[in-house]
Image (spheres, helix red, strand yellow):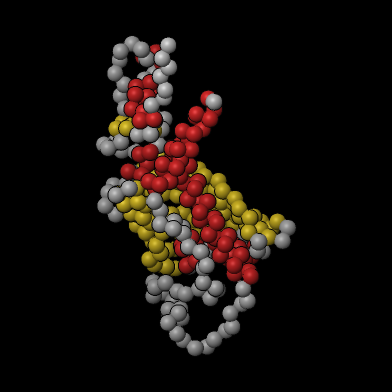
Amino acid sequence: MHEQKPGFDLMLVPVAVDRRGNLVFHRNLRAANEPPDARGQGSRARYRPLYSATFSSEMQLENSFSVAAPPDRVFAYLLDVNKVAGCVPGAELSEVVDPSTFKGKVKIKVGPITVAYNGTARIVDRDDSSHSASIEAEGRETTGPGSARAKATMSVVAENEGSIVKIVTDYNVAGRVAQFGRGVMEDVSRRLVGEMAACIKANVEAGESRPAPEASSSTGPGAATDEGSGALTSSPSPTAVATAKPVNALGLLFSVLWARVRGVFGAKS
């Protein structure tokens, strides 16, 4: 008897999203969308094709990482938007409205398509004594109807000679970026947050290993602008030694899909 091998072309090219918001691949489409009692009865499945559907996805992401620096210094770094913006993949800081409000842009490239969001973020809750804070952000696509909202709650606690940073992010994404389904979106988001955490960790620890800069009364190109001007201000601490790379969501997407394919075949072997 001839044994039919799995067709990779049926697994690697998503064409729609099922009722649970997950990607559906070619001939798997019907089984994923039909209720159990309808399968095998010739009824035609209804689905949302990737190229025409409107997508929305709500998710929560938890992340923690250690930093070889005291909580006070780590917490101050996390709330310094001039520094952290360089660690957020695809982000560009455009204006500091006040110490708690700032505006910027985030770009995500998916193959030849680039999705850009203009948004505003605010520090809505800050407790220096417990080293905890919450940040709310919202943005809209610059050339489409898509939108994104997020609330990140962070805390820094001491551990041995360093600190542990914990971040819980609740976010909602609507539009083209959400078309890949909740499962893939969570995997991609987890990797992006991991890149941001690695960048923050590297910069804070590098700052710990450097001597503090000497104070200077001279005014140069890097001096801060007048308060309330809306322009960005330079940071008195050492320049970040690491920055986030531009977001290539297509590469992340295929790496996530390939990991899932390997997991499926690994489980069967």
Classify 100 as above or below 107. Answer: below
- Camera sees residue 172: no
Q: Position of residue 12 (x, y in %)?
A: 38, 34
- Asked whether 41 or 224 is in front, the reply is 41
Task: Give the image quarter of residue 256.
Answer: top left
Residue occupying image coordinates x 31% and y 21%: 45
Could you tell me which quadrant the N terminus lies in? top left
Residue occupying image coordinates x 55% and y 73%: 237
Residue occupying image coordinates x 61% and y 65%: 205
Q: Residue furthest front?
A: 1
Could you tell me which quadrant the C terminus lies in? top right
Q: Position of residue 245 (x, y in %)?
A: 44, 58
71 displayed left or right of 58 = right
> Total number of numbered labels?
0
Q: Position of residue 69 (x, y in %)?
A: 65, 63
Q: Residue furthest right?
A: 160
- Asked whether 34 or 121 is in front, the reply is 34
Task: Give the image quarter of residue 53.
Answer: top left
Residue occupying image coordinates x 56% and y 51%: 167
Q: Position of residue 42 (x, y in %)?
A: 30, 13
- Camera sees residue 210: yes
- Asked whether 40 or 228 is in front, the reply is 40
Classify 136 as above or below 84. Answer: above
